[in-house]
């Protein structure tokens, strides 16, 4: 079991790039596998989660070839040959690993296939609720069995002919919306999903890329069954959820500046920029790619961060960034309140409990609510030893917190980082490594907590 050590920040690199977007990588290989023909995918995220989707599509009959692996290990060039929407019955159960996206989106695809298939995952995934996809897919005519009230994995899915439905989502979840749309694509007629709040729209955008039309009307999305996806090459932009770690690191150092290159800037994912702007960072995004998934560079200038309130319709847009935003809150003056985020309790771990526990270990006062927390920031952070709870975003968020603490912060159980960010430790070293030229300006150093300032600039 790996351990990650974080130490006081020594250096802000001028620029950095992050690996491919996890949500888009999953969908790219799944949808390419449903096409008849060849799709080249560039910058596919080679993380454990996305590789689970890739292997699943191979098990279901797609041919996937890895043409190239980027020298920094952050992206793969794939050639996916799909054989149409009639998939092959897999010889063995499909392992979804730690990936909720793999299990939920595949459920939507498998709901219409004329065979029985088993989906299983690791301990964390086996505790997560699959009822949210089983309910609508069962209404459409699929047979789905799982464990207990929450219909947990392993799932047995017996697909067949599907009826279209109009389905109001009980929770704002892009994964559930996607599962219903993918089943709707294979049903006869018109399927509509009504969201309680806007969730990420990668499924709609990527389906459009492959020639499948969906119609949006305010909070509802409609798809007509019977359309056939057409193979077409694509490039996956960098993941803004991975960029968020470096955004917070730079945002919390007044005067610091970093450019993050080639990041996805889909407006259903950029809530983290809005929150950090409210907190006092200066951020500019430069959209360079407009077609399909918007992408470009983000420039962040640090400032004295202030507390904010995060809640309501904004939550789905920042759902994966809330652990690192909680760390930003610990570095900001005042009381930050996060509400309406009870979904965090059913992620890879209970992220409200994990964040609250680890922040308290670092000396930060936190009040926990069922749907969020109140964090009193601005005090010194104590270096501590803590657990990731097997959750990649908890591990990385507290590696960033450790940059602002007064010693060595030890995070146990960090193999999980491979779930979304291969190469994170190497990138972290760019910020921690004393051999890098410190290009953080001196006036910045004078405004940092004393211990950090001393390490950056011993004569200070
Ligand atoms: C994802 C949607 C979100 C997010 C997850 C990836 C996706 O989950 O937390 O990391 O790719 O659709 P929910 O849609 O269940 O909130």
Image (cartoon, grey):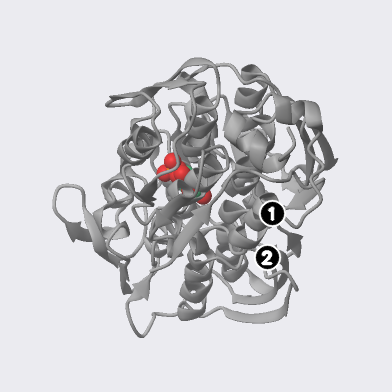
Relative to 18, 22 lies left or right:
left
Residue at the location (64% across, 30% down)? 252
Relative to 433, 389 lies left or right:
left
Circle number at residue 75: none
Residue at the location (68% across, 30% down)? 253
Q: Secondary structure at mark 1?
A: loop
Circle number at residue 18: 1
- Residue neighbourhood size for the residue with mark 1, other residues' Cα within 10 Å, grouped as few (<14), some (14–19), many (≥20): many
Query: Hey, which quadrant is residue 451 in on the image?
Result: top right
Circle number at residue 74: 2
Query: Hey, which quadrant is residue 106 in on the image?
Result: bottom left
Residue 249 in view, yes or no: yes
Query: Hey, which quadrant is residue 373 in on the image?
Result: top left
For the C terminus, the image quarter is top right
Q: Is mark 2 within 8 Å of ligand 1?
A: no
Q: Looking at this view, name the residue that lies furthest to the left.
A: 148
């Amino acid at each position: 079991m790996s351990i990650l050590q974080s130490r006081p920040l020594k250096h802000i690199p001028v620029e950095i790039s992050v690996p491919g977007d996890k949500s888009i990588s999953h969908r790219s290989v799944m949808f390419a596998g449903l096409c008849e023909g060849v799709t080249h995918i560039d910058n596919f995220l080679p993380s454990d989660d996305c590789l689970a989707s890739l292997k699943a599509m191979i098990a279901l009959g797609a041919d996937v070839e890895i043409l190239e692996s980027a020298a920094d290990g952050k992206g793969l060039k794939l050639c996916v040959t799909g054989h149409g929407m009639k998939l092959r019955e897999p010889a063995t159960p499909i392992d979804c690993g730690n990936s909720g996206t793999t299990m939920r989106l595949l459920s939507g695809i498998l709901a219409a296939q004329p065979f029985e298939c088993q989906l299983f995952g690791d301990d964390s995934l086996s505790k997560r609720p699959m009822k949210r996809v089983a309910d609508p897919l069962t209404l459409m005519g699929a047979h789905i069995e799982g464990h207990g009230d929450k219909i947990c994995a392993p799932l047995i899915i017996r697909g067949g002919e599907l009826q279209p439905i109009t389905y109001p989502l009980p929770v704002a979840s892009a994964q559930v919306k996607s599962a219903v749309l993918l089943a709707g694509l294979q049903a006869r007629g018109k399927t509509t999903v009504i969201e309680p709040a806007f969730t990420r729209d990668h499924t709609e955008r990527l389906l459009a890329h492959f020639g499948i039309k969906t119609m949006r009307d305010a909070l509802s999305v409609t798809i007509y069954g019977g359309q056939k996806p057409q193979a077409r090459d694509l490039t996956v932009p960098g993941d803004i959820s991975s960029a968020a770690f470096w955004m917070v690191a730079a945002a919390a150092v007044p005067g610091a500046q970093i450019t993050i290159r080639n990041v996805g800037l889909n407006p259903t994912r950029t809530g983290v920029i809005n929150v950090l702007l409210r907190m006092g960072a200066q951020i500019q995004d430069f959209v360079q790619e407009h077609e399909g998934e918007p992408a470009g560079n983000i420039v962040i200038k640090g400032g004295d961060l202030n507390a904010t309130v995060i809640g309501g319709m904004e939550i789905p847009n920042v759902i994966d960034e809330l652990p690192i935003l909680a760390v930003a809150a610990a570095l900001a003056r005042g009381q930050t309140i996060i509400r309406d985020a009870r979904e965090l309790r059913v992620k890879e771990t209970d992220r409200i409990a994990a964040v609250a526990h680890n922040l308290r270990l670092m000396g930060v006062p936190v009040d926990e609510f069922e749907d969020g927390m109140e964090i009193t920031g601005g005090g010194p952070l104590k270096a501590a030893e803590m657990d990731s709870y097997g959750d990649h975003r908890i591990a990385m968020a507290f590696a960033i917190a450790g940059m602002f603490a007064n010693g060595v912060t030890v995070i146990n159980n960090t193999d999980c980082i491979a779930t979304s960010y291969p190469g994170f430790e190497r990138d972290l070293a760019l910020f921690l490594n004393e051999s890098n030229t410190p290009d953080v300006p001196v006036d910045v150093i004078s405004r940092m907590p004393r211990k950090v300032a001393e390490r950056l600039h011993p004569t200070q």
